[in-house]
Structure formats: C-alpha cells, structure tokens
Image: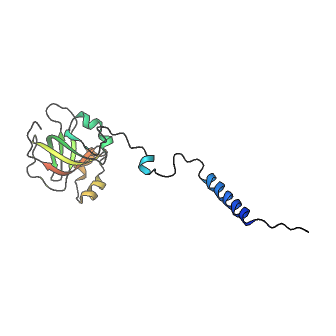
Amino acid sequence: MLTRKPNLFMRWALAGALSFSALGVASCGTEGPETGADVEDVQEAPEETETNNTANPFDGPYDQDFLDDVDVREGQEVTVSANVNEIITPEAFTIAGTEDTTVDPLLVLHKNAEPELKPELTVKVTGTVHTAFDLPAVEKDLDVDLDDALFEDWDGKPYLKASEIDTSVAADD
C-alpha cells in the first residue's frame, strides 16, 4: 500500500497563499499607494480666503465688510481700527466704524481698565471674535461681575474679547 505524505513545501505555499489572499481582501477599498502617503496628502486643505486665512488674520477698519464676515471669523484673533462709541463699564466699551462707515456698534470686552478711552477716540483693538454674547459665560471668562441691565441688549450679538487696545493711532489709520 502506498501512503502519500504531504510535501512540506506545499504546506508552506498553501499557508502563504491563504495569508496573502486574506491580506488582499482586508485592503480592498483603499485607494492610492500603501506607502509614501501621509495624512496631509490625503486630507484636502481648506481653501484660503481673505476671511479665513489664519496666516494673515484680519487687520483693518471696523466696517461693513468685517461685520458681514463676522460668522467666519469666530475664534480668530483680529485687529480692527475704529472710533470708541460709548464707554459702558471699565471692562466694556463699544466701537463704531470710522467716519466713512455706518456699521452698528460692536461690543469690546477687556480685563484691564483703559483710562485713556473716551468717545470719538480712534483705537486699534486686537482681540478674539465671538459671534454671540452670553453674559454668564463672559463673566466667567473675564472673572468679573457685569451689570445685567447694561448688557441685556447685547445678548446673542457679536463682540470682541480684546487682548490689546492701542490708543495711540491716528484718526485715519
């Protein structure tokens, strides 16, 4: 009687073929080469526009163009030039557009009292844009207690949290 023993080579070949086919099935559905690509190659970079370009943040007058794009500026640090409109508290004031604009006032909040501020003074404010004022959140963020009645009209409106206020700018900047 003749008995056949499977060839050791055949066992290895069969095991390798099964492993390779399982690997091939697991990789189905992927596109592109398996090596040489990293996350940046696969993800598309957002289109840079004048309003969302974080490499060149907004630096210009507080005008209708700025206000029209305030939603896309949420969380961005910007610098705006404007005239002080009204001093509300030592931590808050409003700015209005310069003489050639007619935008609604924008609330500016800051931690430090600015004794030089007065209405009609041209300032350059650097700060973070927020699209919706929320008094309890702002009080917690600035660690201050603001008068609710003075800020109720600002609820839900855009504002700037100032990090720097430059009062030495010329009126035409």
**Image point (22%, 55%), residue name:** 146
Q: Name the residue nearer the viewer: 49 or 26.
A: 26
Residue furthest toward the front?
2
x and y, in percent, of residue 63 in the image: 21, 35
- Count of picture labels: 0
Q: Name the residue nearer the viewer: 72 or 160.
A: 72
x and y, in percent, of residue 10 in the image: 73, 62
Q: On the rendered structure, is 172 left or right of 103?
A: left
Q: Quadrant of the N terminus?
A: bottom right
Q: Name the residue nearer the viewer: 125 or 139.
A: 125
Tell me which corner region of the image, top left, top right, bottom left or bottom right, holds residue 145. bottom left
Q: On the rendered structure, is 12 left or right of 62?
A: right
**Image point (42%, 43%), residue name:** 44
**Image point (27%, 54%), residue name:** 138
In this view, 114 is above or below 65:
below
x and y, in percent, of residue 18 in the image: 68, 58
How does the figure colour the protein chain or chains? rainbow
